[in-house]
Image: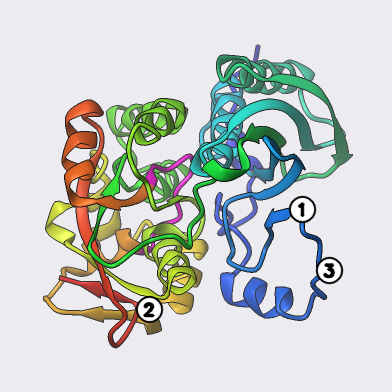
Amino acid sequence: MEQVKLTAHVKAGGCASKLNPAILERVLGTVPRVSNPDVLVGFDTSDDAGVYRITPDLALVQTVDFFTPVVDDPYTFGAIAAANALSDVYAMGGVPISALSILAWPAGGELLHLEAIMKGGASKIHEAGAVILGGHSVSDEEIKFGYAVTGTIHPSRIKTNSGARPGDALVFTKRLGTGVVSTALKRGIARESDVEASIESMLTLNRAACEAMLRFDVHGCTDVSGFGLLGHAREMAVGSGVTLEIDVARLRFLPGAVEYSRQDALSGGLKNNRAFASSCVETHRELPIEIENLLYDPQTSGGLLISLPEEDAAALEGDFPAAHRIGRVVEKTGRVIHLV
């Protein structure tokens, strides 16, 4: 197979971030809501996935996610895309059961590379215990790939992003920085070891984190993806009617992330996230700009942000070493996110 550079198929400034969140929020506000008692989670609170009740004991968790390449290796890109899509189901506390692939591929693209992407995605879907039922493809000069994933959950055990309670601790389960590392890779300034550490993080399913958190009294959960830590924290705070205090000193970053942020390896998605969420943020300490950038950095297959009682947070940290407390939930006061 010829040497491949998948990120060359990403348009200038492109990254794995979502549509500008301000635009998305404004447009969704115009979409009519249809009342249905079986819709347990819709798009009203910008949650990670929708949940639809089938029986008193069974509900479906449904989500979709796809994006442009964040790494050059086709197999790895496919696997990361699958892990990222599966994450939304885990954030709700669900179990993935099936997936449909979504593909945009250049008409003259190398078929061996496409085959590798599909195989990589299948490997992660199968690792999650789910199956691929089919998919849909279109011709596009910019490569895009991902999945629509369906999972199952008991209707009484759903974890939403709007359940955080004052007095809870905030726990996060991965390191931040996949966006700036990916941008540094596209610019040719990333060290191989830093890219490998970022890839390892993105390939790690949130399955184990989900299983660990479900052993405790979790009040709220969201996965941190395209809107960055503060964008998703904003959604949790607004949906829950609380303020989140985030202790920046407790955050963990991927190798090289702070350095690449200092070198201005910032995606368009990061800048959109800052424009969207910064008005909700109150800063109680002076932050270096390279650290502040990483709070808005779009994440791919990022960690779970979990709200749960303090005693359970300590136990979760003991059971799942990647979990680490990054703050707490307090009564709503001033802006909905305080950086302390």
For the point 29% across and 88% down, the residue is: 334
Furthest toward the front, the residue is 56
Name the kind of residue labelled 3 in the image.
Val
**Residue 36 location in percent, x, y?**
81, 61
User: On the image, numbered disc 2 is attached to which residue?
Assistant: 278
User: On the image, numbered disc 3 is attached to which residue?
Assistant: 34
Closer to us: 189 or 151: 151
Image disc number at residue 38:
1
Inter-mark Cα distance, 2 to 1: 35 Å
Direction from residue 272 to residue 322 in the image, left or right = left
For the point 87% across and 40% down, the residue is: 139
Inter-mark Cα distance, 1 to 3: 11 Å
Majority secondary structure of magenta residues: loop
Direction from residue 62 to residue 129 in the image, left or right = left
The local secondary structure at tag 1 comes to loop
Closer to us: 235 or 66: 235
The segment highlighted magenta reads 296-304
Res 263 → quadrant: bottom left
Name the kind of residue labelled 1 in the image.
Asp
